[in-house]
Image (cartoon, helix red, strand yellow):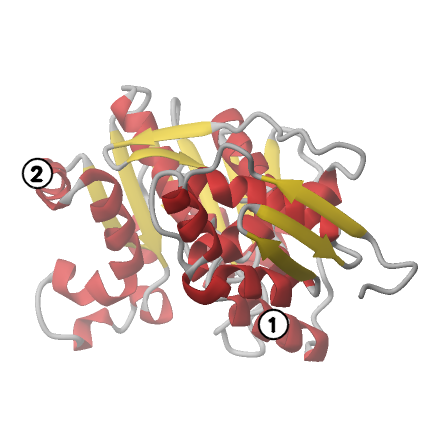
Amino acid sequence: MPMTNEIVERIDFKDIDNNTLQRLCGILDQNLQSISKKLDIKITRQLNHFTISGDQSKLGILALYRLMKLAEKRDLNNEDIHLTLVSLQAEQAELPDTHQPTQKTILKTNKGTIQGKTPNQDLYIKSLLKYDIIFGLGPAGTGKTYLAVAAAVDAMDKHQIEKIILVRPAVEAGEKLGFLPGDLTQKIDPYLRPLYDALYEFMGYEKVTKLLEKGLIELAPLAYMRGRTLNNAFIILDEAQNTTKEQMKMFLTRIGFGTKAVITGDLSQIDLPNHVYSGLKDAYDKLSSIEDICFHEFESKDIIRHPLVQKIVNAYNNDSPAKKLKK
């Protein structure tokens, strides 16, 4: 029996078929148990009649409705449950007085349509489409680079840009690349692999290979950007927390007409020597007051990897003396 003051909600899925009901609940109701554990609620059912009790029982109902839509099409997994709860919790934080979902902004790639899994990711996508210079700041797993690559592919498919350029700081900005075996591509491949992977996912291996051969996709270490002016391009500078002040200024002044630049980084994972000030921090200090430049910040609640990643990031942040950037 629930406590007297405990919130209790009931829901009947009248028209649900047996296959969808089985996929929604999982084997031996494992999916319901997972939802219960994550929201600290209790879910009981008799056939298609559900009773949810606990402080977050309303959120539990919303989760069941949203997961039922997925269960109508396929089996559910732990990732589906985790992402659904993350998305709903973020929506409730942004819109406490309404359960109506906000209009999603969509990017189109060969993989299909891409949209934000949290309201903050959706705002980031809108910023990627609106601004010419966007800084994506936040912890690993929030989709900073992934969504930026998706926006670049979307822009190329719409013929809004002619070229995609993906940039990362390499070993000491490239000065020691000469000690590595192979040609330039082989030297920088390890540093650019995450960007390659995103491109392959959105465009397919064959198309990416052809565009690389034609020079319409370029991957380069930051040190090789000096002296260039880049027009009609979509440039992504990843791991920007490991740039120096001089390198960041050099990169930002490469931008020409018709070019969009996205700079992503995690200020809690700076690998520079202690005496070197991060170019990403410096850019925030100097440029955050410019209205036409967007600084978009992610938080641990936007992480869409394994649920433990969010707890790990929070634990390190609580132990870190680094000052959090202000909006």
Q: Residue 241 placed where, x, y %?
A: 51, 61
Q: Residue 92 placed where, x, y %?
A: 72, 43
The numbered disc on residue 311 is: 1
Q: Residue 199 placed where, x, y %?
A: 25, 45
| Distance from Cα at disc 1 to Cα at disc 2 | 41 Å
Q: Is disc 1 placed on a helix, strand or loop? A: helix
> Which residue is disc 2 drawn over?
210
Q: In the picture provided, is 184 more to the left or to the right than 33?
A: left
Where 97 falls versus 76 (above or below)? above
Where 284 falls versus 271 (above or below)? above
Q: Residue 280 placed where, x, y %?
A: 56, 56
Q: Is disc 2 placed on a helix, strand or loop? A: helix
Q: In the picture provided, is 165 more to the left or to the right than 292?
A: left
| Residue 230 in sight here | no
In primary-sequence order, the first of circles 1 and 2 is 2
Identified at 77% across, 59% down, the residue is 54
Estimate how packed mark 1 is, as few (under 14), some (14 to 19) or many (20 or more) residues with alpha carbons within 10 Å: some
Identified at 18% across, 34% down, the residue is 216
Identified at 26% across, 37% down, the residue is 111
Q: Nearer the viewer, residue 276 or 267?
A: 267
The quadrant in which residue 312 appears is bottom right
Q: Nearer the viewer, residue 141 or 296?
A: 141
Identified at 22% across, 44% down, the residue is 218
Estimate how packed mark 2 is, as few (under 14), some (14 to 19) or many (20 or more) residues with alpha carbons within 10 Å: few
Q: Nearer the viewer, residue 230 or 21?
A: 21
Query: Which quarter of the figure is the N terminus placed in?
Result: bottom right
Tag 2: amino acid: Lys
Tag 1: amino acid: Lys
| Residue 271 in sight here | yes
Q: In the picture provided, is 70 more to the left or to the right than 197?
A: right
Q: Nearer the viewer, mark 1 or mark 2?
A: 1
